[in-house]
Amino acid sequence: MIFRNTIAITILLAGTAIAAAQTVVVTPEQETVVREYVTTNPVVVERPSNFELVIGAIIPDVFKPGALADNTLPNKYQYVQMDGRTVLIDPQTRKVVHIIER
């Protein structure tokens, strides 16, 4: 019985880790629409030296991200431009969910 519980807990934790690591899938066409929107509505921020820009990173509170237009992507995301890249942010968690390269 203990072994079965251990396996169940391990599977649950592994599933949680995988779900937390998932990124948002943005098609090339959607990236083009986002780029065009961000070009006309820039929100440029300076990356702090102690901040690593990676998927899953939490954007510091000092940043005031912009909101994408409702028709840009199916989900509501915020964005900033950092280091020449467009960073999509989940507004509830402030986590980086997608990075659009130059």
Image: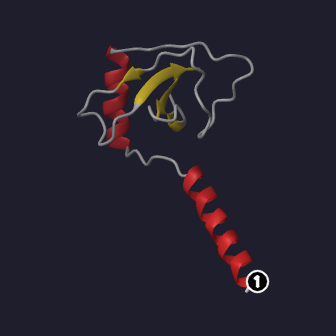
Compared to residue 42, the image places residue 77 above or below, namely below
Q: x, y (%) of residue 49?
A: 73, 17
Residue denoted by label 1: 3
Q: x, y (%) of residue 85?
A: 52, 26
* Total residue callouts: 1
Left or right of 1, for residue 59: left
Residue in view at x 69 percent, y 29 percent:
52
Residue in view at x 62 percent, y 35 percent:
57
Question: Which element is circle 1 on?
Answer: helix
Q: x, y (%) of residue 94?
A: 52, 31
Furthest residue toward left = 71
Q: x, y (%) of residue 35?
A: 37, 27
Quadrant location of the N terminus? bottom right
* Image quadrant where residue 39 sits: top left
Residue in view at x 46 percent, y 35 percent:
90
* Image quadrant where residue 11 sits: bottom right
* Image quadrant where residue 60 sits: top right
Left or right of 73, for residue 43: right
Residue in view at x 34 percent, y 15 percent:
41
Compared to residue 63, the image places residue 85 above or below, namely below
Compared to residue 20, the image places residue 34 above or below, namely above
Q: Pick the residue in front: 89 or 5.
A: 5
Crowdedness of circle 1 by 10 Å Cα count: few (<14), some, many (20+)? few
